[in-house]
DNA sequence: GCATTGACGAAGG
DNA sequence: CCCTTCGCCAATG
């Protein structure tokens, strides 16, 4: 489901009690990341058609905490496979722990074999 | 309403 | 190869 999220943002605005559709799109993609796999902000942004707005994906994750159903934000890393958002979790080690549970090895705040378990929505999901 | 700030990323020096 | 700058755009002061 590739849609003009960018346009919907400005159009639908946000009802406050409801998140931006762009955010929902991000959440939707993140929720579809297979267990044991990870992706990057850029990949998601690219899938949504806003390749140059990877920051927005990160910003979207800000609301992922109170999003329902829950969003596995720990599977989203920066392009280097680093746990850039671990500071935003309940505890600084929460993100790493969640990844470890999925057999994903983390070392020095970076996912090992990142390219190997990388999951590109634009490629794996729909095109 | 302008300025600053990001869970980013690519390009330039 | 490391560091800086710039683009992107919503949110916040």
Image: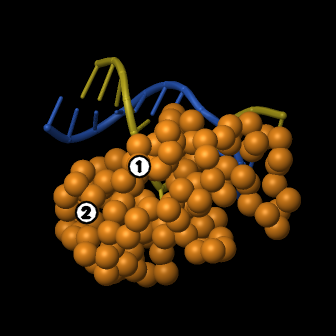
Chain colours: A orange, B yellow, C blue
Position of residue A87 measured from the top left corner of the image (x, y, whole percent): 44, 70
Position of residue A75 measured from the top left corner of the image (x, y, whole percent): 41, 64
Q: Is residue A107 visible?
A: yes
Q: Is residue A77 visible?
A: no
Residue drawn where x is 31% and y is 81% of the image: A101
Left or right: A79 with respect to A43?
left
| Depth check, front residue: A35 or C2 | A35
Q: Secondary structure at mark 2?
A: strand
Tell me the quarter of the picture where residue A16 sits: bottom right
Q: Is residue A36 above or below residue A6?
A: below
Residue A124 - label? 1
Numbered disc 2: what chain?
Answer: A
Q: Nearer the viewer, mark 1 or mark 2?
A: 1
Position of residue A10 measured from the top left corner of the image (x, y, whole percent): 79, 40
Q: Is residue A56 above or below residue C13?
A: above
Residue drawn where x is 40% and y is 65% of the image: A34
Position of residue A20 measured from the top left corner of the image (x, y, whole percent): 73, 54
Residue A111 - label? 2
Q: Secondary structure at mark 1?
A: helix
Residue A80 - label? none
Left or right: C7 with respect to A67?
left
Indicate which disc, 1 or 2, sits on the residue closer to the N terminus: 2
| Depth check, front residue: A35 or A11 | A35
Numbered disc 1: what chain?
Answer: A
| Depth check, front residue: A59 or C3 | A59
């Amino acid at each position: 489901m590739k849609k003009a999220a960018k346009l919907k943002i400005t159009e639908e605005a946000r009802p406050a009690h409801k998140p931006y559709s762009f955010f929902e799109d991000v959440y939707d993609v993140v929720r579809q990341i297979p267990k044991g796999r990870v992706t990057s902000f850029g990949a998601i942004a690219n899938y949504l058609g806003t390749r140059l707005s990877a920051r927005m994906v990160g910003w979207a994750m800000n609301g992922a905490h109170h999003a329902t159903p829950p969003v596995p934000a720990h599977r989203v890393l920066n392009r280097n496979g680093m746990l850039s958002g671990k500071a935003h979790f309940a505890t600084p080690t929460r993100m790493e722990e969640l990844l470890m549970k999925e057999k994903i090895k983390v070392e020095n705040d970076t996912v090992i074999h990142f390219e190997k378990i990388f999951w590109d929505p634009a490629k794996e999901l729909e095109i």
